[in-house]
Amino acid sequence: MTRLVALAWRWLWSQPMVAALNLVMLALGFGAMVLLALVSEQVEEQARRDLSGIDLVVGAKGSPLQLILAGVFHVDVPPGNIPLAARDALAAHPMVAEVIPLSLGDSHRGFRIVGTGTGLLGLYGARLASGRPWQAPMEAVAGADAALSAGLRLDQAFAGSHGLGGGGEIHDETPYRVVGLLAPCGCVLDRLILTATESVWAVHEHATAIDDEDRRALAAERELTMLLVRYRTPLAAAVLPRWVQDQPGLQAAVPALESARLFRLLGVGLDVLRALAALLLGVAALSVFVALTHAVREREPDLAMLRMLGASPARVAAVVTLEALLLSLAGLVLGLALGHGLAALVGSLLHAERSLVVTGWWWSTQHPRIAGLAILLALAAVAWPLWRVRRLPVATLLQAP
């Protein structure tokens, strides 16, 4: 068997330009499929993890999908603020088990500062790597990625900047102090800096108030950005969203529905990219078929000589089949390397934008299917050349001048 593989490998590279072209086309096709599988699976897995435990998101009137993107995934800006009384009204509702407030508006080196309650830590099962949760205004707990990238350490003071993307006015007069660092959780908390809701109010009231009268007026008009709600009973899914919609200025977004709509929108684009990858693989398969057919025609005298020396038809066919398999598997290996490398590149770009986490070290459930496709593609491309090998006119070829 080793000799057959070695012979097939030499035959494959007897025409290096053709073999290299086919290899590149196969690698591009397989690489595109691997990249799509890696990115789509990781985004869906992260979305399921970030949405886990959240039954409803309540915010200002606007797009429900925007509420999910801003309040759960933290990749968009919120549509506005809602009155503080909305939190109290929802918390008093008999069908509500928990209300977690979110106050957005500032960031530190591109990482969002989120004013909230410690219930957000419990929602995601977050653990502290060191320190403790915040217990007073202006105390902060940094997520794993935020702490690493922003260089935050325990008992370090830092100032937030206005705006969710950084680059805004620095609030130097109201610094935060790091009292805790979260262990990596693989969820959205990794890239957030958490503090008490009162901290966000204190920063902005200090920045805008001129005197005590202004401070009292601002305190009376305090607002939140949005609310994350957990139901007490399954019946709330049918009642509570409509109840929220009836409240003036409030918008309800159901994460399960909005995430499904988001994935449908993304799915259209992914289907187009998959179709392009399949088209590229189809062209590659056709190219391999043409190359093998041409190679078998050119090697007919050599194949006839092998038959005369005692090689069975099955043994000769095995060499041709191995040639196609070696080419397809080499393209698969290069495609895997290309797909994982591009996924790592996409992950680094998303990390720079403080967005979703994508890595090239992910093992996709589609890998076995893609490997099976590589084998099927090779067998399909070699089917006609094998038929020619089986019907090889050995005697006629040996008598030819």
Image (tube, grey):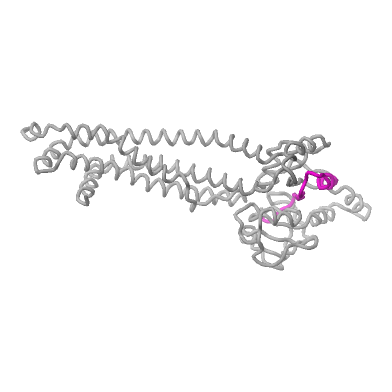
- At x 61% / y 57%, what residue is drawn? 185
In the image, residue 94 lies in the stretch drawn in magenta: yes
233, 132: nearer the viewer: 233
Extreme-right residue of the structure: 213
Q: Report the side of 67 relative to 392 (left or right).
A: right
Q: Position of residue 188 (x, y in %)?
A: 64, 52
231, 145: nearer the viewer: 231
In the image, residue 107 lies in the stretch drawn in magenta: yes
Residue 399 falls in which quadrant of the image? top left
- At x 94% / y 53%, what residue is drawn? 213
Q: Position of residue 327 (x, y in %)?
A: 30, 43
Q: Report the side of 126 relative to 205 (left or right).
A: left
- At x 69% / y 67%, what residue is drawn? 131
| Vertical relation: 305 (above or below) 341 | above
| Image quarter of the C terminus | top left
Residue 156 falls in which quadrant of the image? bottom right
Q: Position of residue 320 (x, y in %)?
A: 23, 40
| Vertical relation: 278 (above or below) 9 | above
User: Which region of the structure is painted magenta?
Assistant: 84-109
